[in-house]
Amino acid sequence: MKTLNNDLNIKKLNIGIVGLGRLGREYANNIQYKVPNANLIAACSLNKEEIEFARNKLEVEKTYSDFDKMLTNSNLEAIVIISSTNVHAEQIIKAMNKGLHVFCEKPLGIDIKECLMVEEEAKKYSDLIIMVGFVRRYDPSYKYAKKTILENKVGAPFFVRSQTVDKDIWAPFQLEFVKTGGGIFHDFNVHDVDLARWFIESEVERVWSQGGAYRFEEFGKVNDADNTFSFCEFKNGSMALIGASRTAPHGHDTFTEIIATEGKLTIGSPPSKNQVQISDKYGVRQECNETFFDRFKNAFLIQIQDFVDSVIINKQPECNLSNATNATIITTAMTTSFQTKGIIKIEDVISKNK
Protein backbone atom coordinates (compact mmCIF):
# COMPACT_ATOMS: atom_id res chain seq x y z
CA MET A 1 0.00 0.00 0.00
CA LYS A 2 1.04 3.62 -0.50
CA THR A 3 2.59 4.78 2.77
CA LEU A 4 4.31 8.04 1.87
CA ASN A 5 2.74 11.27 3.06
CA ASN A 6 -0.58 10.27 4.52
CA ASP A 7 -1.21 13.88 5.52
CA LEU A 8 -4.74 14.58 4.30
CA ASN A 9 -3.90 18.28 3.90
CA ILE A 10 -1.54 17.56 1.02
CA LYS A 11 -3.12 18.13 -2.38
CA LYS A 12 -2.72 14.94 -4.41
CA LEU A 13 -3.03 14.76 -8.17
CA ASN A 14 -5.11 11.89 -9.57
CA ILE A 15 -3.21 10.38 -12.51
CA GLY A 16 -3.90 7.80 -15.18
CA ILE A 17 -1.10 6.15 -17.15
CA VAL A 18 -1.13 4.59 -20.62
CA GLY A 19 1.69 2.20 -21.47
CA LEU A 20 3.14 -0.20 -18.90
CA GLY A 21 6.13 -1.63 -20.73
CA ARG A 22 9.70 -1.54 -19.48
CA LEU A 23 9.77 2.23 -18.92
CA GLY A 24 6.05 2.63 -18.19
CA ARG A 25 6.32 0.34 -15.17
CA GLU A 26 9.07 2.49 -13.71
CA TYR A 27 6.99 5.65 -14.19
CA ALA A 28 3.96 3.96 -12.64
CA ASN A 29 5.92 2.75 -9.63
CA ASN A 30 7.36 6.23 -9.07
CA ILE A 31 3.92 7.85 -9.27
CA GLN A 32 2.23 5.35 -6.99
CA TYR A 33 4.89 4.90 -4.32
CA LYS A 34 7.50 7.65 -4.53
CA VAL A 35 5.68 10.88 -5.44
CA PRO A 36 3.88 11.89 -2.24
CA ASN A 37 1.43 14.30 -3.87
CA ALA A 38 0.22 11.91 -6.58
CA ASN A 39 -2.25 9.03 -6.79
CA LEU A 40 -2.17 6.56 -9.67
CA ILE A 41 -5.87 5.76 -9.97
CA ALA A 42 -6.06 4.37 -13.53
CA ALA A 43 -3.89 2.40 -15.95
CA CYS A 44 -4.33 1.43 -19.60
CA SER A 45 -2.65 -1.27 -21.66
CA LEU A 46 -3.50 -3.75 -24.38
CA ASN A 47 -1.27 -6.30 -22.66
CA LYS A 48 -3.03 -8.53 -20.10
CA GLU A 49 0.17 -9.12 -18.16
CA GLU A 50 0.68 -5.37 -17.80
CA ILE A 51 -2.90 -4.95 -16.58
CA GLU A 52 -2.32 -7.64 -13.96
CA PHE A 53 0.84 -5.83 -12.90
CA ALA A 54 -1.14 -2.62 -12.42
CA ARG A 55 -3.80 -4.37 -10.38
CA ASN A 56 -1.64 -6.60 -8.23
CA LYS A 57 1.66 -4.75 -7.85
CA LEU A 58 0.54 -1.14 -8.11
CA GLU A 59 -2.92 -1.49 -6.54
CA VAL A 60 -4.48 0.66 -9.26
CA GLU A 61 -8.24 1.11 -8.76
CA LYS A 62 -9.29 1.11 -12.43
CA THR A 63 -7.63 -0.64 -15.36
CA TYR A 64 -8.52 -0.34 -19.04
CA SER A 65 -7.64 -1.84 -22.39
CA ASP A 66 -9.16 1.17 -24.20
CA PHE A 67 -7.57 4.63 -23.86
CA ASP A 68 -10.80 6.46 -24.74
CA LYS A 69 -12.66 4.64 -21.97
CA MET A 70 -10.00 5.57 -19.43
CA LEU A 71 -10.46 9.21 -20.35
CA THR A 72 -14.11 8.98 -19.24
CA ASN A 73 -12.97 8.42 -15.63
CA SER A 74 -14.29 11.58 -13.98
CA ASN A 75 -11.77 11.39 -11.13
CA LEU A 76 -8.78 11.82 -13.43
CA GLU A 77 -6.87 15.11 -13.40
CA ALA A 78 -3.79 14.19 -15.45
CA ILE A 79 -2.54 11.61 -17.93
CA VAL A 80 0.98 10.18 -18.22
CA ILE A 81 1.68 8.83 -21.72
CA ILE A 82 4.37 6.15 -22.04
CA SER A 83 2.88 4.44 -25.10
CA SER A 84 4.31 3.92 -28.59
CA THR A 85 5.68 7.10 -30.14
CA ASN A 86 3.39 6.88 -33.17
CA VAL A 87 0.29 7.46 -31.00
CA HIS A 88 1.68 10.19 -28.71
CA ALA A 89 0.17 13.12 -30.60
CA GLU A 90 -3.29 11.55 -30.87
CA GLN A 91 -3.37 10.64 -27.18
CA ILE A 92 -2.16 14.06 -26.05
CA ILE A 93 -4.89 15.81 -28.04
CA LYS A 94 -7.57 13.46 -26.72
CA ALA A 95 -6.43 14.07 -23.14
CA MET A 96 -6.38 17.85 -23.60
CA ASN A 97 -9.87 17.74 -25.08
CA LYS A 98 -11.00 16.11 -21.82
CA GLY A 99 -9.42 18.93 -19.80
CA LEU A 100 -6.57 16.79 -18.49
CA HIS A 101 -2.98 17.81 -17.81
CA VAL A 102 -0.47 15.74 -19.78
CA PHE A 103 3.00 14.34 -19.31
CA CYS A 104 4.32 12.54 -22.40
CA GLU A 105 7.56 10.60 -22.67
CA LYS A 106 9.89 11.74 -25.45
CA PRO A 107 9.72 12.12 -28.37
CA LEU A 108 6.58 14.14 -28.89
CA GLY A 109 6.21 12.38 -32.24
CA ILE A 110 8.03 11.19 -35.32
CA ASP A 111 5.85 13.21 -37.67
CA ILE A 112 6.53 16.95 -37.62
CA LYS A 113 3.04 17.84 -38.79
CA GLU A 114 1.59 15.92 -35.84
CA CYS A 115 3.89 17.77 -33.44
CA LEU A 116 2.81 21.12 -34.88
CA MET A 117 -0.83 20.01 -34.65
CA VAL A 118 -0.39 19.26 -30.93
CA GLU A 119 1.17 22.69 -30.39
CA GLU A 120 -1.71 24.37 -32.21
CA GLU A 121 -4.33 22.41 -30.25
CA ALA A 122 -2.60 23.23 -26.96
CA LYS A 123 -3.17 26.95 -27.58
CA LYS A 124 -6.85 26.33 -26.78
CA TYR A 125 -5.91 25.03 -23.33
CA SER A 126 -3.58 27.58 -21.77
CA ASP A 127 -4.76 26.49 -18.32
CA LEU A 128 -3.37 22.97 -18.81
CA ILE A 129 0.16 21.81 -18.07
CA ILE A 130 1.63 19.90 -21.03
CA MET A 131 5.11 18.51 -20.46
CA VAL A 132 7.41 16.28 -22.54
CA GLY A 133 9.95 14.02 -20.84
CA PHE A 134 13.53 15.07 -21.54
CA VAL A 135 14.88 13.35 -18.46
CA ARG A 136 18.52 14.34 -18.76
CA ARG A 137 17.66 17.93 -17.93
CA TYR A 138 16.67 16.60 -14.49
CA ASP A 139 19.84 14.61 -13.90
CA PRO A 140 21.92 16.32 -11.16
CA SER A 141 25.13 16.18 -13.23
CA TYR A 142 23.53 17.75 -16.30
CA LYS A 143 21.75 20.35 -14.16
CA TYR A 144 25.07 21.25 -12.54
CA ALA A 145 26.69 21.61 -15.96
CA LYS A 146 23.93 23.98 -17.07
CA LYS A 147 24.30 25.97 -13.84
CA THR A 148 28.06 26.21 -14.40
CA ILE A 149 27.47 27.59 -17.91
CA LEU A 150 24.89 30.12 -16.70
CA GLU A 151 27.35 31.31 -14.06
CA ASN A 152 29.91 31.86 -16.85
CA LYS A 153 32.54 29.70 -15.14
CA VAL A 154 33.76 28.13 -18.39
CA GLY A 155 32.85 30.85 -20.87
CA ALA A 156 30.52 30.44 -23.84
CA PRO A 157 29.89 26.90 -25.18
CA PHE A 158 30.71 26.45 -28.86
CA PHE A 159 30.97 22.66 -29.25
CA VAL A 160 28.95 19.80 -27.76
CA ARG A 161 29.87 16.16 -28.19
CA SER A 162 27.14 13.86 -26.94
CA GLN A 163 26.28 10.20 -27.34
CA THR A 164 23.59 7.71 -26.37
CA VAL A 165 24.91 4.15 -26.31
CA ASP A 166 22.90 1.11 -25.24
CA LYS A 167 24.04 -2.35 -24.23
CA ASP A 168 23.97 -4.78 -27.15
CA ILE A 169 21.53 -7.21 -25.53
CA TRP A 170 18.70 -4.70 -26.08
CA ALA A 171 19.13 -4.50 -29.87
CA PRO A 172 16.64 -7.29 -30.75
CA PHE A 173 14.06 -5.65 -28.50
CA GLN A 174 14.67 -2.25 -30.13
CA LEU A 175 14.29 -3.71 -33.63
CA GLU A 176 10.62 -4.37 -32.92
CA PHE A 177 9.99 -0.65 -32.37
CA VAL A 178 11.83 0.94 -35.29
CA LYS A 179 8.61 1.53 -37.26
CA THR A 180 6.56 2.86 -34.35
CA GLY A 181 9.46 4.71 -32.70
CA GLY A 182 10.99 6.30 -35.78
CA GLY A 183 14.45 4.73 -35.63
CA ILE A 184 17.72 5.46 -33.90
CA PHE A 185 17.76 9.25 -34.33
CA HIS A 186 14.26 9.81 -32.93
CA ASP A 187 14.63 7.21 -30.20
CA PHE A 188 18.23 7.75 -29.07
CA ASN A 189 19.48 11.12 -30.26
CA VAL A 190 16.42 13.18 -29.41
CA HIS A 191 18.00 13.46 -25.94
CA ASP A 192 21.37 14.58 -27.27
CA VAL A 193 19.73 17.10 -29.60
CA ASP A 194 17.75 18.56 -26.72
CA LEU A 195 20.90 18.83 -24.60
CA ALA A 196 22.87 20.52 -27.38
CA ARG A 197 20.13 23.12 -27.86
CA TRP A 198 19.89 23.58 -24.08
CA PHE A 199 23.61 24.13 -23.57
CA ILE A 200 24.37 26.16 -26.71
CA GLU A 201 21.11 28.19 -26.65
CA SER A 202 20.85 28.45 -30.42
CA GLU A 203 18.95 26.61 -33.13
CA VAL A 204 20.40 24.02 -35.50
CA GLU A 205 20.79 25.19 -39.09
CA ARG A 206 22.20 22.14 -40.92
CA VAL A 207 22.86 18.47 -40.17
CA TRP A 208 24.87 15.70 -41.76
CA SER A 209 24.42 12.11 -40.58
CA GLN A 210 26.28 8.90 -41.37
CA GLY A 211 26.06 5.36 -40.04
CA GLY A 212 25.17 1.79 -40.78
CA ALA A 213 24.08 -1.61 -39.54
CA TYR A 214 27.57 -2.79 -38.71
CA ARG A 215 26.72 -5.59 -36.28
CA PHE A 216 22.98 -6.17 -36.53
CA GLU A 217 22.15 -6.35 -40.24
CA GLU A 218 18.43 -6.48 -39.47
CA PHE A 219 18.40 -2.72 -38.83
CA GLY A 220 19.66 -2.05 -42.33
CA LYS A 221 16.74 -4.00 -43.75
CA VAL A 222 14.32 -1.48 -42.15
CA ASN A 223 16.35 1.54 -43.32
CA ASP A 224 17.79 2.12 -39.85
CA ALA A 225 21.21 1.66 -38.22
CA ASP A 226 22.92 0.28 -35.14
CA ASN A 227 25.63 2.99 -35.05
CA THR A 228 25.48 6.60 -36.26
CA PHE A 229 27.14 10.00 -36.01
CA SER A 230 25.60 13.37 -36.84
CA PHE A 231 27.27 16.73 -37.26
CA CYS A 232 25.09 19.74 -36.42
CA GLU A 233 25.82 23.35 -37.29
CA PHE A 234 24.02 26.02 -35.23
CA LYS A 235 22.89 29.46 -36.32
CA ASN A 236 25.34 31.16 -33.94
CA GLY A 237 28.26 29.20 -35.44
CA SER A 238 28.46 26.58 -32.69
CA MET A 239 28.72 22.87 -33.47
CA ALA A 240 27.62 19.51 -32.10
CA LEU A 241 28.77 15.97 -32.83
CA ILE A 242 26.10 13.47 -31.81
CA GLY A 243 26.54 9.72 -31.71
CA ALA A 244 24.34 6.70 -31.14
CA SER A 245 25.02 3.00 -30.75
CA ARG A 246 23.04 -0.15 -30.06
CA THR A 247 26.12 -2.38 -29.82
CA ALA A 248 27.99 -1.63 -26.58
CA PRO A 249 29.12 -4.82 -24.83
CA HIS A 250 29.86 -3.03 -21.53
CA GLY A 251 26.50 -1.40 -20.76
CA HIS A 252 24.61 1.86 -21.11
CA ASP A 253 27.09 4.63 -21.93
CA THR A 254 25.66 8.15 -21.98
CA PHE A 255 28.36 10.78 -22.40
CA THR A 256 28.37 14.53 -23.02
CA GLU A 257 31.26 16.95 -23.37
CA ILE A 258 30.78 20.72 -23.63
CA ILE A 259 33.71 22.74 -24.98
CA ALA A 260 33.55 26.44 -24.08
CA THR A 261 35.76 29.48 -24.61
CA GLU A 262 37.33 29.23 -21.13
CA GLY A 263 37.06 25.56 -20.25
CA LYS A 264 35.11 22.37 -20.75
CA LEU A 265 32.58 20.19 -18.95
CA THR A 266 32.49 16.39 -19.17
CA ILE A 267 29.52 14.34 -18.01
CA GLY A 268 29.35 10.55 -17.79
CA SER A 269 32.97 9.53 -18.40
CA PRO A 270 33.68 6.83 -17.46
CA PRO A 271 30.10 5.42 -17.47
CA SER A 272 30.41 3.94 -13.97
CA LYS A 273 27.34 2.93 -11.97
CA ASN A 274 29.07 3.89 -8.70
CA GLN A 275 32.40 5.00 -7.22
CA VAL A 276 33.65 1.45 -6.52
CA GLN A 277 36.83 0.37 -8.27
CA ILE A 278 37.37 -3.39 -8.54
CA SER A 279 40.88 -4.83 -8.53
CA ASP A 280 41.13 -8.57 -9.17
CA LYS A 281 42.79 -11.15 -11.45
CA TYR A 282 41.17 -9.46 -14.48
CA GLY A 283 42.72 -6.08 -13.71
CA VAL A 284 41.38 -2.79 -12.38
CA ARG A 285 37.93 -1.74 -13.48
CA GLN A 286 34.56 -0.21 -12.61
CA GLU A 287 31.15 -1.69 -13.34
CA CYS A 288 28.82 0.02 -15.82
CA ASN A 289 25.09 0.67 -15.73
CA GLU A 290 23.07 -1.98 -17.55
CA THR A 291 20.26 0.28 -18.81
CA PHE A 292 19.34 3.92 -19.30
CA PHE A 293 16.96 3.66 -16.34
CA ASP A 294 19.76 2.51 -14.07
CA ARG A 295 21.76 5.58 -15.12
CA PHE A 296 18.90 8.06 -14.80
CA LYS A 297 16.77 6.44 -12.10
CA ASN A 298 16.92 9.47 -9.82
CA ALA A 299 16.31 11.88 -12.70
CA PHE A 300 13.14 10.03 -13.76
CA LEU A 301 11.73 10.48 -10.26
CA ILE A 302 12.69 14.17 -10.10
CA GLN A 303 11.12 14.71 -13.52
CA ILE A 304 7.71 13.22 -12.73
CA GLN A 305 7.72 14.99 -9.37
CA ASP A 306 8.26 18.28 -11.23
CA PHE A 307 5.30 17.54 -13.48
CA VAL A 308 3.02 16.88 -10.51
CA ASP A 309 4.26 19.99 -8.71
CA SER A 310 3.84 22.09 -11.87
CA VAL A 311 0.19 21.05 -12.14
CA ILE A 312 -0.54 21.69 -8.48
CA ILE A 313 1.05 25.15 -8.39
CA ASN A 314 0.13 25.98 -12.02
CA LYS A 315 3.70 26.45 -13.26
CA GLN A 316 4.61 25.91 -16.91
CA PRO A 317 7.46 23.37 -17.20
CA GLU A 318 10.76 23.98 -18.99
CA CYS A 319 10.36 20.86 -21.12
CA ASN A 320 7.47 22.16 -23.18
CA LEU A 321 5.92 21.36 -26.54
CA SER A 322 8.07 23.87 -28.42
CA ASN A 323 11.30 22.23 -27.25
CA ALA A 324 9.88 18.82 -28.14
CA THR A 325 8.82 19.89 -31.64
CA ASN A 326 12.23 21.42 -32.34
CA ALA A 327 13.93 18.20 -31.25
CA THR A 328 11.72 16.16 -33.62
CA ILE A 329 12.47 18.55 -36.49
CA ILE A 330 16.20 18.03 -35.98
CA THR A 331 16.02 14.24 -35.58
CA THR A 332 13.87 14.11 -38.71
CA ALA A 333 16.60 16.02 -40.55
CA MET A 334 19.17 13.55 -39.19
CA THR A 335 17.10 10.61 -40.41
CA THR A 336 16.73 12.17 -43.86
CA SER A 337 20.45 12.92 -44.04
CA PHE A 338 21.32 9.33 -43.08
CA GLN A 339 18.95 7.90 -45.68
CA THR A 340 19.98 10.27 -48.50
CA LYS A 341 23.68 10.69 -47.56
CA GLY A 342 23.31 14.45 -47.93
CA ILE A 343 23.53 17.63 -45.87
CA ILE A 344 20.06 18.72 -44.77
CA LYS A 345 18.99 22.27 -44.00
CA ILE A 346 16.54 22.58 -41.13
CA GLU A 347 14.60 25.34 -42.94
CA ASP A 348 13.92 22.89 -45.79
CA VAL A 349 12.59 20.28 -43.38
CA ILE A 350 10.30 22.84 -41.79
CA SER A 351 8.99 24.17 -45.10
CA LYS A 352 8.11 20.63 -46.25
CA ASN A 353 6.05 20.01 -43.13
CA LYS A 354 4.06 23.22 -42.79
Image (spheres, rainbow, N blue to C red):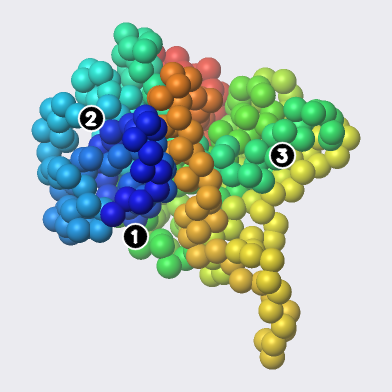
Locate the C terminus and report the quarter of the image it occupies.
top left
Q: Secondary structure at mark 1?
A: helix
| CA distance separating discs 2 and 3 | 37 Å
The residue wearing badge 1 is 173
| CA distance separating discs 3 and 1 | 33 Å
What percent of the width, then of the height, locates residue 33? 37, 50
Locate the N terminus and report the quarter of the image it occupies.
bottom left
What percent of the width, then of the height, locates residue 212? 49, 53
Q: Secondary structure at mark 3?
A: helix
The residue wearing badge 3 is 145
Instruction: Name the kind of residue labelled 1 in the image.
Output: Phe
What percent of the width, then of the height, locates residue 142? 65, 42
Sort mark 1 into few (<14), some (14-19) or many (20+) by Cα contacts within 10 Å: few
Question: What residue is at 45 percent from the left and 14 percent from the top?
Answer: 351
Name the disc covering residue 76, or none: 2
| CA distance separating discs 2 and 1 | 32 Å
Q: Earlier in the sequence, mark 3 or mark 1?
A: 3
Sort mark 3 into few (<14), some (14-19) or many (20+) by Cα contacts within 10 Å: many
Question: What residue is at 40 percent from the left and 43 percent from the top?
Answer: 5
Viewer-side label of 2, 3: 2
Q: Earlier in the sequence, mark 2 or mark 1?
A: 2
Q: Secondary structure at mark 2?
A: loop
Does residue 112 appear left or right of residue 206 in this picture? left
Vertical arrangement, residue 122 with respect to residue 106, above or below: above
Going by the picture, which residue comes out furthest to the right?
Answer: 262
Going by the picture, which residue comes out furthest to the bottom?
Answer: 281
Viewer-side label of 2, 1: 2
Q: Is residue 155 visible?
A: yes
